[in-house]
Every structure is written in C-alpha cells, then in structure tokens.
Amino acid sequence: MTKIRILFNVLEVLKTEDIFPKVKSLGIETISVFGNLGWEKLPYYFKAIAKEFPVRSEVSNGVNINLYHIPTYKGEAGWQDSLRKDAERTISSLAQLGINNYCWMIECNLYGYKWNPLVGKYVHRDRLIEHFNTFYDIAHSVNPNANVIIVPYPHPLINLNCGIHGWKDWWIKYGEKMKFDQVSLDAHVGVWIYAINKKSIYKRLVNSIKFLKERGYSVSYVEVGYPTVGFKPLTGLYGWGREKDQIDLLDTCYQALTDMQVPYLQICEFIDPASAQVYERFFGNKGKVPKFLGFIPVLEEAHWGVFKSNGAEKKVCEWIRKVTGIIPEKEVIL
C-alpha cells in the first residue's frame, strides 16, 4: 500500500516542538526537508528530525534531504573543490544522525533559463551530468550507506533540446548517464504536468511511472501538490484551486501510485509560509514571491501546504488521516 510522505520547503523558521506533533497527528512517519551544502554545521533541528523520523525497514523511509549547493548551480570557478569541501562536511554530519537519503536538487539546472521566475539565475541544465555525478561520488566516498535519489520532472520544458518525445528523451539522453541509487518523480499537476481532468492526471502519472519501470527503474516516490489559492480557473484546468480541489487531486494521484505500486506519495508541502517567514533562497530578494516573465506573480508558491500559515488544518488533513488510518484524539494546536 502506498504511504504518505510530506515535504517541508522551509523548516528552519518553524518550531519543531509544535510542528512535529502535527505531522504525527496525520499518521505521517516520513518527511523531506531541504539542506544546504554550505553550512558550517547542521542546523539545530536536524537532531530532532533524526529522532522523530528514524529509518525503518525500507531504504526510502526515514528522512530525505533535498540538497543544494549554490556555487555548483551558479557554475562559479572552483565549484568542484567547493562542492567536495562542503559536501564532505555536511554528508558526514548527516550520516552520523542516520540520515542517508540525499536528493540532489536538479531543478535549478533543468530550468536554468532567464525567463524562469525561480531559477533563471542558475547555469544551464546541459552541465547537470557533471554536477550530479560529482556529488554522487563524494556522497558515497563519505557515507557508504548513501542513497542518492534522482528526481526527474515529466514536463515538456525538460525537452527543449532533446527531441519530440518530451522528458522521456531527456531521461534517455541525460538522466541515464547520471549516477544514482533510486529514482523518484516530481510531478506537480498543472505545474510540471498538464492535465485537464482527473482521467488525464491518472493517465499521465501512470504513463510516466510505467516508462521508468519498462527501462528497469523502480520509482520510490512521486511528489505532487495542489496549491489552494482560493479559486479554480473557469477552464477547469488543474494547477491551483480550492481546498476541496486539493483533496480531489491528491486522491487521484494516490490511486495512480497505488495501482503502480509506488511506495510513497510525497505531498508538497506541509504548511503555507507566513508573512514573517523568509523564503529568500528560493524567492530571491527578501523572500518575495517570484514573478513569471518579470510581472506575473506565481501565486501558488504561498499556498502549497496542507496546513494554513496560522497552523490551522486544511480540509485535506482528514483525507490524509483516512489514507494513513489515523484518527487523532484531539486536534493539535500551534
């Protein structure tokens, strides 16, 4: 049976003593967080993460760290030496806590175009193989138990220089030249996957997973999300909508993953960012929401959560409890 994971985009601004009980109240035992390979030492909350979400029977269980490294992504001179120095320190510290699952952030390179509102400042994705393989070698040299996860995007923009068959051409031309231990998918409907209805969503997810399986790769998890900006476009297209649409979307994705025997559905993300939270490493100048083409606000970035920014539950939390089989004794309040 497919299980539920949850992603935290920004955990350092939250109180783990308040947040982790909320995670547990949903019956969720595995989480993903971001990590910087430039830290002098791990932030305080990593010890709490390792304690609250330990590795269990499956290698994909426990904690996944989405790792990024600014000098590498920007292609700065000497990035290889910088990556080795930073990765050896950070991976060693994570390994000591029993955190072995590392998702090397490829999206910064896949979408390294100037028009991209989020990651246009990074180097072009054609250099990704060198970046990815360098990290893989370092991670395994430092931690024999390292589990490096590659997370391709089944999205047409991945394919601008690869052929006529979308991301599949990219995977064959580039993805399979990278070193990795597991494969997952980042398949946000309406953002990474175009879909007009539930049948289309189901079909596209199944098709993407089946493609990887047919080429000999199991999929450890698929990340999806549905931002609740408060209204649904009149066209009916998926991408953002209301709280009830969030439930509808995730339920469809869950059925697809269950039918394809994917171990985990990863939901992006746990909580909406509050105005006081700084998303600067993603949003740039003082954490401002990015703008597509320089003037169109990317509204969904502030509404991915299954919890509202004030800690209140969205309707989807009850759906999650039905999937995990958890009925809390009482609501946990922030």
Image (spheres, rainbow, N blue to C red):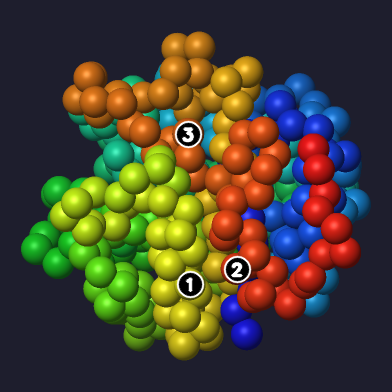
Query: Quadrant of residue 130 in the image?
Result: top left
Q: Position of residue 271 (x, y in %)?
A: 62, 42
Q: Position of residue 121 (x, y in %)?
A: 33, 23
Q: Position of residue 82 (x, y in %)?
A: 58, 25
**Residue 251, which numbered label?**
1
Q: Residues at badges 2 and 1 in contact (C-beta under 8 Å)?
A: yes
Q: Amino acid at mark 1?
A: Asp
Please, what secondary structure does the residue beneath circle 1 have? helix
Q: Earlier in the sequence, mark 3 or mark 1?
A: 1
Q: Residue at x 24, y 49 (%)?
A: 233
Q: Is any atom of residue 38 visible in this view?
A: yes
Q: Earlier in the sequence, mark 2 or mark 3?
A: 3
Q: Residue at x 87, y 54 (%)?
A: 52
Q: Is residue 285 above or below residue 57?
A: above
Q: According to the image, label 3 marks what residue?
A: 302
Q: Is residue 75 above or below residue 163?
A: above
Query: Quadrant of residue 176 in the image?
Result: bottom left
